[in-house]
Image (cartoon, rainbow, N blue to C red):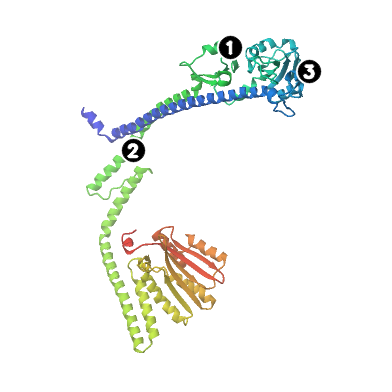
Amino acid sequence: MRSFRRLWQSVFVKFSASFLLVGLVPLIALSIFSLQTFSSHVQRFTVNNLQQMSLYMSYNVNNLFSDYDEISKLMYTGRYEGGTINTWVSQTVNVNEEEKINNTSIDSFLKIIVSSDKYIRSAYFVRASDHKLYYQTKETTAFTAERLPLGEWMAPLHEQPNRLAIIPTHDDLYYRGTARKVITFGRNLIDISGNLQPDPKIVGTLFFDVDVAAFDNLFNGLDLGANGEIYVLDGRRRVFFSNTGYDEDFVLAGGESDHHLVYRESVPYINGQVVLRIPRRDLFEQLTTTRSAVYVAIVFCTLVIMVMGMWFSKRLLAPIQNVLQHMLKVESGNLNTKIERYGRDEIGRLAHSFNRMVERLNEFINEAYVAQIKQKQAELNALKSQIRPHYLYNTLEVIRMNAVYKDDEEVAEMIRSLSNQLKYVIDYGEDWVTVRQELDHLEDYFYIIRVRYDNRIQLQVQVKDERLFNVMILKLSLQPIVENAVQHGLLPKGGKGAIDVMLEQQDDRLVVTVRDDGVGMGAEKLAELKANLLDARTPAAKVGLKNVHERIRSACGKPYGVDIESKIGVGTCIRLTYPVRHLKDTAQGT
């Protein structure tokens, strides 16, 4: 028991057990669940698909019989080229004396029937008065009229003279050398001229053979496997089509069982049905193969995980123990220890970091006094940096007061503006200031510009809403834009012009527009300037616009920044977009 407890406390045993538990249990559970879900889904999908296909096939078969019924009615409707029908003309006279159907010769009418559908092989017309046979065919072999089973074909037409007769699939043995499977359709031609009589007056009978390939065309897209069976039956269980033969007893005996799936859909036109009979083994053969492959994969993965878990645990434990031993040495106060051999994996990097930690610990101990001295020096330099600006401000104030004393108001005002600018620039406070503070600094800067250029350059500031004076803006973002307008827009023009600065709120954005009426720039230079704004390789310290653009994007995000428009001879327009922020927002870092 004691040895078992000691073994269980080993990292190797715990890691191996955890590795196997975490690896195997989810793998087996997920594999079995996925397999069951996949199998159930495939089976439901297959069954539903076959049901839909059987319904679709029954619909097509019903339409097929309906189409051939319409062809048989051409004797009455006359819906073909050159065909007309007059209900007052006696069909008896028309057929018996003129050998015509609807003012078309019987032979021509039969040609029309044969050509009306590619699966109609032959057409026959039997005149009732003398049983004379007319026929037209697509067959190229000799026709033997004596072998035509007219008596068998006439039987259902005697029982129901007004209905279409359908003779189930049979061989067209009346053509020499052929063994084609055909279905024969028959309809009586009744004289409908004059008054209706209880017993219809039959003038003749039309028959035409339809190749069973018409059904093949319907069922071509249905994949039932190698042993799947398809049957088309009428109400008397007669076989009209089968892909396995025409054994009626086999059809009646085959039903749904554990080994077969059977689907039946009705065909109303013949009071019959379409029957699909598929072996379950063939239908789900691929699914069975997939299931077996998954089970084999589970067993294989289980063995691999067990072997890899044991090997990995042993390989992981040795370097960890080595690091632990050296850590105990450091804990005892030995800072000269070092792990000599380690790999390049995570444990190796841990050993390397341990060595670096010991080295840095020695360095930190040795440099502790040096760090304290440097800290004192930094504090002293900070005090000096505070003294120098005050000395500069005081000196400028003495010079300004001297200019006032000598009644040189312009020089005094320029010194005051310069002093204000220096205070604004050197102040190491927050980066965000109010619009009013930034505009005051801009006015101080532009005062010197106006004096320098004899008031030939004017600055106009327009704020559309007074509440915008309290909106926060990045410090020193307007002065570089105005300076660019003076240097690159107005001075090349001759040093005369105006700069308009307009601030307005658009939705949740503050839009600052700086427009000058200077020389402007061409499309090529404008494109180059815009590219420099987006190119990270362009040094921001050398391009004022890029500096402002990157500051805005860094502080506010990509939707904000600088946009430029310009035309030669018209001027340049630069827009700066900010989020609308107030003092409390910037203080909270929003």
Query: Quadrant of the rendered structure where residue 191 is?
Result: top right
Q: Position of residue 149 (x, y in %)?
A: 69, 11
Residue at which label 2 appears: 316
Q: Foreground mark, 2 or 3?
A: 3
Q: CA distance from mark 2 to mark 3?
A: 109 Å
Q: Secondary structure at mark 2?
A: helix
Q: CA distance from mark 1 to mark 2?
A: 73 Å
Question: Quick one: label 1 or label 2, which is nearer the N terminus?
Answer: 1
Residue in the image at 39% along x and 81% along y: 414
Q: Which amino acid type is marked by label 1?
A: Asp
Residue in the image at 66% along x and 20% along y: 211
Q: Which amino acid type is marked by label 2?
A: Leu
* Mark 2 crowdedness (10 Å alpha carbons): few <14, some 14-19, many ≥20: some
| Residues at circles 1 and 2 in contact by the CB criterion of under 8 Å | no
Q: Which amino acid type is marked by label 3?
A: Glu
* Mark 1 crowdedness (10 Å alpha carbons): few <14, some 14-19, many ≥20: few
Q: Position of residue 340 (x, y in %)?
A: 33, 45
Q: Secondary structure at mark 1?
A: loop
Residue at which label 3 appears: 97
Q: Foreground mark, 1 or 3?
A: 3
Q: Secondary structure at mark 3?
A: loop
